[in-house]
Image (cartoon, helix red, strand yellow):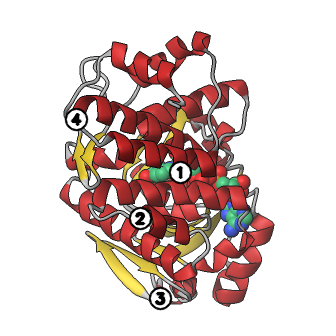
């Protein structure tokens, strides 16, 4: 097992990591602990948690409907009311367990309850392990617009144990792979598409990608916790991706976060080719590879203005200008180049490019 530090948050990664939660109730002399589990996968997650951490079985358990369409501040009111009724206070540690939606919502709920109570994350999807549980961003959506209400607040610890991946559906596995590939493209100048392909079937390769993603995220968030500069690069693929996600939410269509990011990365690579000299051939190889694994996101020409309106609501925008992350090569990001609306439209009109 490996431990990576993100300031005062320790991130434990590897087989057996979840067992570190077992002694929490014993070592918390002046603190209580409660468990916040997502409702949807509770039947898959809780038996594993109980087997590995028998001391947690007796701790108070709260459930949250942690579906993306329920990732709204109003969904947290009943939880906060229950916490208040049960006397939860700043001496209580919340153990968040579930996918990225649960980690975002649970972290947010804890970070503002009584002006902040401590929490740890136990991510149970590949995407939450690779990205959402780490780095201290918590959030809920505002209607369809993604993650506009939130806080920067690190968990005390993150326990990343691959044991939970055993029950993950293939589609969710692919979703997490998209964030792992994103980190390769933004931070690994030696990215090799054959190795990425191998990680779909090789556990050691997958583990190497996961470690790389977490180490890079911890390194970048330590440099720029509140996303004033370099942390923006972690949003590669997300300007377009969040717009696709918002449109899908509005249509009540299922699109995983990773699928949205994968399609968004292709659009942002296209803009990179147009604006920063990213190699055309590499763009074509990458977009063909994304299409092979993730298909394409269908939208009509009439929906393009709506997608652009969602991009204009992006949190990274400055004075109404949209700043997708661009790459000049793998490992070389640009985050200070505004992209004019005409080019956003050009990318959406040209999508899926060939
Ligand atoms: N805070 C951040 O830095 C950050 C980064 C990336 C993504 N996110 C957010 O994360 C969310 C996406 O997270 P996600 O992809 O994990 O989606 P999710 O939380 O919706 O989980 C995906 C599905 O997997 C199920 N599931 C969870 N654990 C399981 C398990 N062990 N076995 C079987 N099924 C399981 C869930 O019930 C759900 O149906 C988005 O809302 C996104 O905005 C946040």
Q: Is residue 200 left or right of residue 46?
A: left
Give whichever of discs 1 and 2 has the lower sequence position: 2
| Disc 1 + disc 2, Cβ < 8 Å | no
| Residue at the image position 52 percent from the left and 27 percent from the top | 351
Residue at image mark 3: 27
Q: Which label sits on residue 333?
A: none
Dot 3 falls on a residue whose secondary structure is helix
- Answer above or below: position of 146 versus 214: above
Dot 1 falls on a residue whose secondary structure is helix
Find ligand 1 in the image and state its quadrant: bottom right
Give whichever of discs 4 and 1 has the lower sequence position: 4
* Rendering quarter of residue 56: bottom right
Residue at image mark 4: 276
- Is the CB atom of the residue marked by disc 2 within 8 angstroms of ligand 1's nearest atom? no
- Is the CB atom of the residue marked by disc 1 within 8 angstroms of ligand 1's nearest atom? no
Position in image of residue 348 (x %, y %)? 48, 22
Q: CA distance from mark 1 to mark 3?
A: 48 Å
Residue at image mark 1: 289
Position in image of residue 92 (x %, y %)? 50, 68
Q: Which label sits on residue 155?
A: 2
């Amino acid at each position: 097992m490996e431990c990576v530090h993100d300031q005062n948050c320790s991130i434990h990664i590897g087989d057996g990591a979840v067992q570190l939660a077992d002694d929490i109730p014993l070592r918390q002399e002046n603190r209580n602990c409660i468990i916040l589990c997502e409702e949807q996968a509770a039947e898959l997650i809780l038996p594993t948690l109980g087997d590995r951490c028998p001391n947690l079985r007796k701790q108070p358990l709260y459930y949250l409907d942690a579906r993306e369409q329920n990732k709204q501040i109003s969904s947290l009111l009943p939880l906060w009311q229950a916490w208040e009724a049960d006397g939860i206070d700043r001496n209580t540690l919340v153990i968040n367990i579930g996918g990225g939606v649960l980690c975002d919502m649970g972290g947010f709920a804890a970070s503002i309850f009584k002006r902040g109570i401590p929490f740890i994350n136990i991510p149970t999807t590949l995407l939450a392990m690779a990205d959402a549980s780490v780095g201290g961003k918590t959030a809920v959506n505002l209607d369809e617009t993604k993650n506009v209400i939130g806080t920067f607040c690190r968990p005390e610890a993150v326990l990343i144990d691959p044991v939970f991946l055993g029950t993950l559906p293939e589609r969710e596995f692919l979703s997490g792979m998209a964030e792992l590939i994103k980190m390769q493209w933004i931070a690994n100048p030696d990215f090799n598409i054959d190795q990425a392909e191998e990680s779909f079937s090789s556990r050691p390769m997958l583990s190497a990608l996961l470690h790389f993603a977490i180490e890079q995220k911890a390194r970048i968030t330590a440099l720029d916790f509140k996303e004033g500069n370099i942390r923006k690069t972690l949003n590669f693929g997300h300007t377009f991706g969040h717009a696709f996600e918002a449109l899908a939410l509005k249509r009540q269509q299922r699109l995983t976060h990773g699928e949205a990011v994968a399609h968004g990365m292709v659009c942002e690579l296209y803009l990179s080719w147009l604006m920063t000299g990213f190699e055309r051939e590499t763009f074509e190889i990458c977009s063909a590879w994304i299409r092979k694994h993730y298909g394409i996101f269908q939208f009509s020409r009439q929906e393009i203005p709506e997608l652009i309106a969602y991009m204009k609501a992006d949190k990274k925008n400055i004075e109404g200008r949209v700043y997708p992350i661009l790459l000049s090569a793998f490992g070389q990001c640009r985050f200070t180049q505004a992209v004019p609306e005409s080019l956003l439209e050009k990318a959406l009109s040209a999508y899926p490019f060939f």
